[in-house]
Amino acid sequence: MNVQVTESGTWRRTLEIEAPAEDVDKRLNDAYRKYSKTLNLPGFRKGKIPLTVVKRQFGKAIQGEVVQEMVQEFYREASEAEGIQPVSQADIEDIDFEEGQPLVFKASVDVRPEIEVEKYKDLKVTRPVFPIEDDHVEGRLKYMQEQNATEQMVERAAELEDVVFADVEELDESGESVPDRKSEDQSIRLFKGEDDKPTELAEQLMGISAGETREIQITRPVQDDHDHDHEGHDHGDEDHEGHEGHDHGDEEPEEETITFRVVAKEVRERNVPKLDDELAKDAGDFETLDDLRARIREEMQTQSEGFARQRVEENLIDALIEENPFEIPDSMVETYLDSMVESYKREHQDHDHDIDEGAIREEGRDQAVRGVMRFLLIDAIADAENIEVTDEDVDEHLEDMAKQYNMESVRLRQILGRSEQLDQIQSDIKTQKTFGFLIDNANVEDVEEVEAGDE
């Protein structure tokens, strides 16, 4: 096979391919024989149709099918032989075929950019440090208390910290129900504010009894239709007074007052468990509350370190892009956007709404450009530093995964192998090893951030 490669653009390569006539004829004859054994023609026994008859009646159709298959196969062989790394679908043109003659065609394709990353050591980056304070741990314990609270229906008027089980509907200025703004069986918690006083919502519902109807007014930032479509009507664990939907910067958000009709069905008293060893035992394999505290601190520390690692990695990518600017093919960006669209479709396949692919692509373009550059930079640095993934690296990673999913590592490897995910795992490990190298060779300044541990 003869191949000539020409540059038809910065990343565009055109392969002029000529496949030998004998290879082409052999494949055609194999196809004729295959069809002669499967075709049914009047006057001929199945499998005994002469090749001349097959060629005469079906030759053009068979040739068209075989030529398309040969074009794709010869293109792949030529790309591999010439070291071409395509990042787009090939545009096939100028196919010249005549039986008994070589098959000639052109294939134009975008290729992966060959970048040289010169400045990737001693990068100056910051890494957030999130100190885990005692009040962070106690806040998590308080949350566990709240999550384990029980509710019991009571035959009395609602008091602070009670839960009102009710139907809620929004009213317009004339006092009529607003269409599609009614929610049934909502749990409304009567919260205390930071000053231990009732919130705006709680103050208006205190004293309500089962069977009673009240109209309440809530002041909140003005919401557009997009907000209404997504806000839902669960009043369970939030006070409308503190509802924040928009980022207005330093500008004071415009407010609106909304009227709701609340029909109480039940009043429920909340019973919060004590913060003691029994709570710890109920939470898992802990003997004492101090054991639970220690585990919470450990988990929060691991979580904060993971977030800090993500942040420093992104800061490194920012620095690498700034120090090593380069262009990328649009086709790589489009492929990245294709994946984003498909991912969005999978995540929303059970949602009954149209998907605006154009909007997804437009809003995700900057992320796609950064994602492609990130991939190329990390891969180039890994190659430059001969960073490889060993069998031991994979085994250790799978052991960690097996513990996480509570299964044997051998079984996990079988599952991942069948689903062809091992290659992706190796790629992820290589990426993390490369980031580890960059961090070890960077000028990293730790910057304390005081809001850690509150999540």
Image (spheres, rainbow, N blue to C red):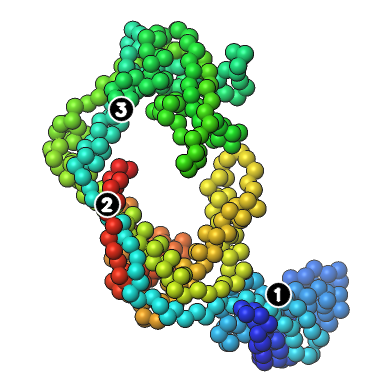
Between label 2 and label 1, give the one nearer the viewer. 2
Viewer-proximal residue among 63 and 283: 283
Q: Is residue 416 left or right of residue 346?
A: left
- Near mark 2 (Cα within 10 A), the count class, few <14, some 14-19 or many ≥20, is many
Could you tell me residue 415's position as x and y percent?
40, 59
- Helix, strand or loop under label 2: loop
Q: What residue sits right under mark 2 in the picture? A: 130
Q: Is residue 302 left or right of residue 44?
A: left
Q: What residue sits right under mark 1 in the picture? A: 91
Count of numbered tags: 3
Could you tell me residue 372's position as x and y percent?
52, 67
Q: What residue sits right under mark 3 in the picture? A: 194
- Helix, strand or loop under label 3: loop
Q: Quadrant of the N terminus?
A: bottom right
Could you tell me residue 15's position as x and y percent?
67, 84
Q: Residue at the spot x=18%, y=30% of the render? A: 275
- Near mark 3 (Cα within 10 A), the count class, few <14, some 14-19 or many ≥20, is few
Vertical placement of residue 328 versus 52, above or below = above
